[in-house]
Amino acid sequence: MPHQIQHMLTLQLFRQHKELILEGLKKKNFKDLEIVDSIIAIDEKRRHIQVQNDEIATVINAASKTIGMLMGQGKKEEAEALKTEVSNKKEEAKSIAQRLALLEEEQQDLLIRLPNLPHISVPFGKTPEENEVVRVGGIRPDLSAQNLPHWDLTTKYNLIDFELGNKITGSGFPVYIDKGARLQRALISYFLDYNTAAGYKEVYPPFMVNEASAYGTGQLPDKEGQMYHATADNFYLIPTAEVPVTNIYRDTISAEHDLPIRMTAYTPCFRREAGSYGKDVRGLNRLHQFDKVEIVQFTHPDKSYEALEGMVVHVEKLLQNLGLEYRILRLCGGDMSFTSALTYDFEVFSAAQERWLEVSSVSNFESFQTNRCKIRYKNAEGKTQLLHSLNGSSLALPRIMACLLENFQTLDGIVVPEVLRTYFGSEIIN
């Protein structure tokens, strides 16, 4: 698919490149392809009615001028007759405007159900097994036969109490205790310092957002069932810092010389849908509430894929600094999010569980979010255009902590990575 037509699903795109839209939607494994024909049909009907509306407006304008001329000539009776005709035309125009508004609302309801189109480099595929491994790094630890999974280590060293969290709230809401809480805080502080040193401005946003914010970043209507909803105020607990941080620039126009805009934020994240069962959700593997540090960028459209690669390198270096074995995946179309044009996932190898755990996703949304949020910039010629938005986990904490505990366990305790020791205050957990 040509890169230049990926940025936004405009009505012109539907009229001129229907087959390319269908190809992109199929790559994303989107099933309701008939929506495309419905949107085109509504657009044709809307444009036809719009022509009628414009013709009536022309008649009204011409008649209004004639009325003025007749009144000036003292032909009051003819002017009054024409006024009656204009009044009837205005009623007709009012009816047409109402029909147009209903069609536009119907069309918009269909448009927001369509996901972002995938970048040309996105591989075909429907399942995580079809994602492409881009590269692998780090060294796998050689653990002793006595190695334990993190849910046993957290009990052994009194770091996290899962049962206490279950009593207070429910499953998926752990309580971090003593050195466990301190390690959590050390990770958050290190991640934020690492990001700000790279030029990301730290922000501390609300942990709840309104409907407009959730719609702007694409959580609504796609992920409505996965978010906790405070119904009395119609607020949503955030599933990621991406939502409030992106909306900081909703309905704004930036100067081109201020680009790129880079922000980082720590927030807790809340997700109702915790996923699968069994070992996949044991301990810290999958939670309803978890901590995450996020990075967000707004860039010039011509530079967003360069920025994406830079964010991938940024997150990769962070994992290297922690000393964890990792791999980077380019997600196939069927495993990508509703909003993304291209996503790289980072997975860390859990030595005790002997499997890969996802710890970060880095994505380019192109203009999908900025079109919804009206996040724009003014170029050198004074023309206002949409920016591109990108975001990435830098990093999600639960599985990072799980892998740190498992991969650095020894018979004497758990060794703290060197980059965290100043924040944690010790070299070992015992």
Image (tube, rainbow, N blue to C red):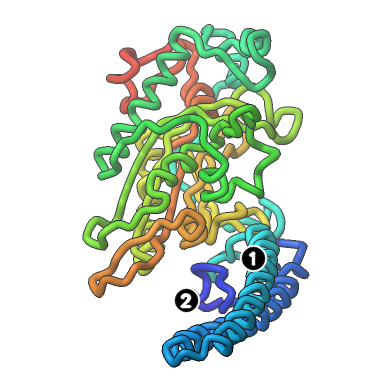
Q: Residues within 10 Å of mark 2 (few under 14, many from 20)?
A: few
Circle 1/circle 2 CB separation < 8 Å: no
Q: Residues within 10 Å of mark 1 (few under 14, many from 20)?
A: few
- Please name the residue shown 56% across and 76% down the image: 1
Residue 24 in view in this figure: no
- Please name the residue shown 31% across and 28% down the image: 419
- Look at the image and tell me in which quarter the C terminus lies: top left
Q: Secondary structure at mark 2?
A: helix
Q: Is residue 69 left or right of residue 23?
A: left
Mark 1 vs mark 2, CA separation in Å: 30 Å
Q: x, y percentage for residue 319?
A: 41, 38
- Please name the residue shown 29% across and 65% down the image: 378
The amino acid marked with disc number 2 is Gln
The amino acid marked with disc number 1 is Ala
> Closer to the camera, 305 or 81?
81
Q: Is residue 137 left or right of residue 270?
A: left
Task: Name the residue carrying label 2.
Answer: 4
Dot 1 or dot 2, earlier in sequence? 2
Q: Is residue 8 left or right of residue 25?
A: left
* Disc marking residue 101: 1
Q: x, y percentage for residue 43?
A: 66, 76
> Closer to the camera, 300 or 112?
112
